[in-house]
Amino acid sequence: MSEGGQIRRRAFLRLAQAGMTALPFLPESGSAQATGGAGTDVGIDKYSRQIRLGLVGCGGRGAWISNLFRANGGFVFTAAADYFEERAMRVGQQLDVPASACFSGLEGYKRLMASGVEAVVLQTPPCFFPEHAAAALEAGLHIYMAKPVAIDIPGTRKIEALYQKAAASKIVFQADYQLPCDPVNMEVAQRIRAGALGKLQTVFSSGWAGGNGYQDPPLEATVENRLKDLVWCNDVALGGDYIVHYDVHILDAVVWALGKAPVAAMGASAAFRPSVHGDARDSGTVVYVFDDGALWCHQGVLGTYHDWIRAGRLTASLQGTQGTACLSYAGKAYVRGGPRHFSGGVPNPEASVRTNIAVFRQAIDDGDYSGLHVERAVSSNYTAILGREAASRRRMITLDELMAENRALQPDLKGLRS
């Protein structure tokens, strides 16, 4: 293994050791699983003041997560930005943001960051995350970012450098993944690390291609129509491909639970959505290889899974010499057989987002700039990109090859409003 590979492996082991202490458990009584996470909402009375927050990206997820930030009580939105003016104004109105603090165009985020906010929530297509996170860090703003953290190797490297710089600059930088802060998945991961499986043999995981695929209308003179309603998911240079922007949820969980990432992959992929205009592939199979010989098969398909994997989307089954385990986004997670059986339960993704928001606020208050969320997200992003490249090139490829290649994906933004 190369020196760079050795460094990444040591980082994975450090994350595995920190895994159960990096995030808090949700309350067991008054279960957040039963209440939709209401137990993690603390209200304004808990805080001496609210953090001034700016939302960058006012699409469906941006509008949804902003309500969870408001429910937390520790934040108040004072600015909103989106490429489309009508979306920035509409969501801004819902958040009680004055029209003068609702910004639009490609550079609306810059005006938002200069408006007096203390932190930003980044919810744009992921091709913009490295640029937006760098600007937020330069402005001294705390960063809460959706997944995936980037769409290519250079962008992921940039995020890796930014989170290290953020710690030195006393900036909280958080990536929003749900599985690793769910209590059930956390318990499964803890038992896996404690030897519940014996020696790992294989992993099988499933994506879902976003369900039945995202609408993919004909290409126009500019990419403006591709920047909304999740159309960007169909363009690799905007969204990174389906395995990177969607399936990365479960890829992230496997890397996190095992404390290591694969070093090579092979595979194939294709597009099966009814209307194909973008270059993203919605279906594919990847076989990942770990440096100890263990194998990991990941499959993402368009539409509903057949009964060969009952749990369906965003689920991973891990097989060891002594036991088996399942990690899941919204299906049952558990450990079966072996010395550390755990009957498990069903995770609640929204409760996990609420927990991440609470952790974000607590980190700001405590001055916790460790950035473990982002370090883990960087590791899994490399894994997702490795899978995409192996499947699209239809050959065996190593992560070290991709790191040396360092190929950047550049979306064509010509003709768009600044």
Image (cartoon, rainbow, N blue to C red):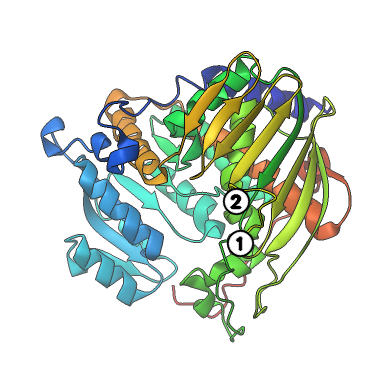
Q: Quadrant of residue 400?
A: top right
Q: Position of residue 382 (x, y in %)?
A: 68, 42
Which three-letter amino acid code belongs to the residue tagged 2? Answer: Gly
What residue do we see at 32% from left, 45% from top? 119
Q: Label 1: few (<14), some or many (≥20) within 10 Å?
A: few
Q: Position of residue 390 (x, y in %)?
A: 81, 51
Mark 2: which secondary structure?
loop
User: In this rendering, does residue 141 appear at all?
Assistant: no
> Circle 1 sits on which residue?
304
Q: Is residue 134 left or right of residue 275?
A: left
Outermost residue on the left side: it is 45
Identify the mark at residue 208; answer none if there is no mark. Answer: none
Q: Earlier in the sequence, mark 1 or mark 2?
A: 1
What residue do we see at 52% from left, 31% from top? 164
Disc 1 and disc 2 in contact, CB within 8 angstroms: yes
Q: Position of residue 104 (x, y in %)?
A: 35, 70
Q: Is residue 280 above or below residue 394?
A: below
